[in-house]
Image (cartoon, rainbow, N blue to C red):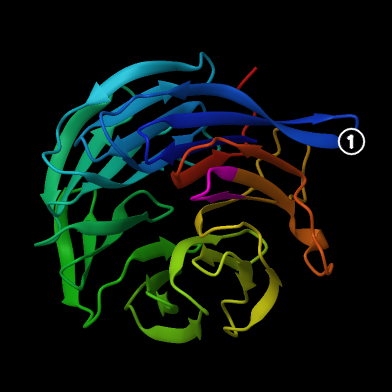
Amino acid sequence: MSLVAGSYERFIWGFKLKSSNETLSLSPLFSYPSHLSQIKAVAISGAVVASGGTDDTIHIYNLNASSSLGSLHDHTATITALSFYTPPHLNFPRNLISAAADGAVCIYDADSFVHLKTVSAHRKSVNDLALHPSGKLALTVGRDECLAMLNLVRGRRSFYCRLGREASLVKFDLTGDKFIMAMEEKASVHVAEDARLLLEFQHPKRILCIEPAENGLLYTGGEDRNITAWDPNSGKVAYCIEDAHKTRIKGIVVLSKDGSDGNDDPHLVATASSDGVIRVWDDRMATREKLNPLAEVNTKSRLTCLAGTSIKHVK
């Protein structure tokens, strides 16, 4: 499992989760002061990593070589969200989708990182984007209190509606049949086909990150410093790891099945906090009164985002 995190201090951090004598540790891969200012978003697919910052640029990295591959300069505003599309059973992404604070979304060919199209998605900043598992469409939410659907094949906006409140996060579930939006302390689950509301659940404090998992649960983290696993069918809490960090949680990564290491039943969840600490947890132990992380590392920086992959690419 490889993890990358962005920071307020313009550094991107890369770590490899290693196992030795039945213990886990986070071993550093690289750290680069890549951007001129704060990093707002990171994404990873196989051995390829992207970061976007308030300097209006996207930087690309190779995990295998722990090196930078250059930068992209097609946006004219802060990069707010990044997502790779990787076809099933492939280890290299086909497309990179990026969103920015001026409402624009850019589509790239991830093989040569050629800019293919810029789509005007929102009148104000894009807060988040969710890429459908098919790679053919994306959902975005923005500061204009609207939800947009983008046709990535034709490179245009195909749907746009007012929500009434500003949504900060949007995610598809792993099947693509549903999507989840977060507005402050509340999250809602919708049918992807017609955006019909299925259920809502209330978080104690503001939600800052959401991650769906193959076990069917939905993981959230935020200003309450807890890792909460929700049942998206009932809206009830499956379990909660309380006080997972000393400060708010800015990112969650759930280990997915890939078969590359013979692991058919993953249980690892990684989290990053604004205090600079990244921790890895075994969710099977979540019912314990006091749960200790399996591994942790302190970057000594203010972390802003986290991404990860379970594919074994890094030597």
Asked whether residue 15 is in view, the answer is: yes
Which residue is found at the position 43% from the left and 71% from the top? 180
Is 204 drawn above or below residue 269 in the view shown?
below
Toward the viewer: 122 or 112? 122
Which residue is found at the position 51% from the left and 60% from the top? 248
Farthest residue to the right: give it: 21
Residue 69 position by quadrant: top left
Which segment did they paint magenta? 271-277
Residue flagged by tag 1: what amino acid is it? Glu
Is 34 drawn above or below residue 193 in the view shown?
above
Which residue is found at the position 13% from the left and 49% from the top? 119
Residue 218 position by quadrant: bottom right
Asked whether residue 261 is in view, the answer is: no
Percent x, y of residue 67: 44, 15
* Residue 203 left/right relative to 42: right
Q: Which residue is mark 1?
A: 22
Is 282 drawn above or below residue 311 in the view shown?
below
Percent x, y of residue 123: 9, 62
Percent x, y of residue 245: 62, 57
Q: Residues within 10 Å of mark 1 (few under 14, many from 20)?
A: few
Q: Is residue 276 magenta?
A: yes
Is 292 drawn above or below residue 58 in the view shown?
below
Q: Is residue 233 magenta?
A: no
The quadrant of the picture occupied by the C terminus is top right
* Residue 222 left/right relative to 310: left
Percent x, y of residue 101: 17, 51
Q: Could you tell me which secondary element the residue under label 1 belongs to?
A: loop
The quadrant of the picture occupied by the N terminus is top right
Q: How many marks?
A: 1
Toward the viewer: 140 or 166? 166
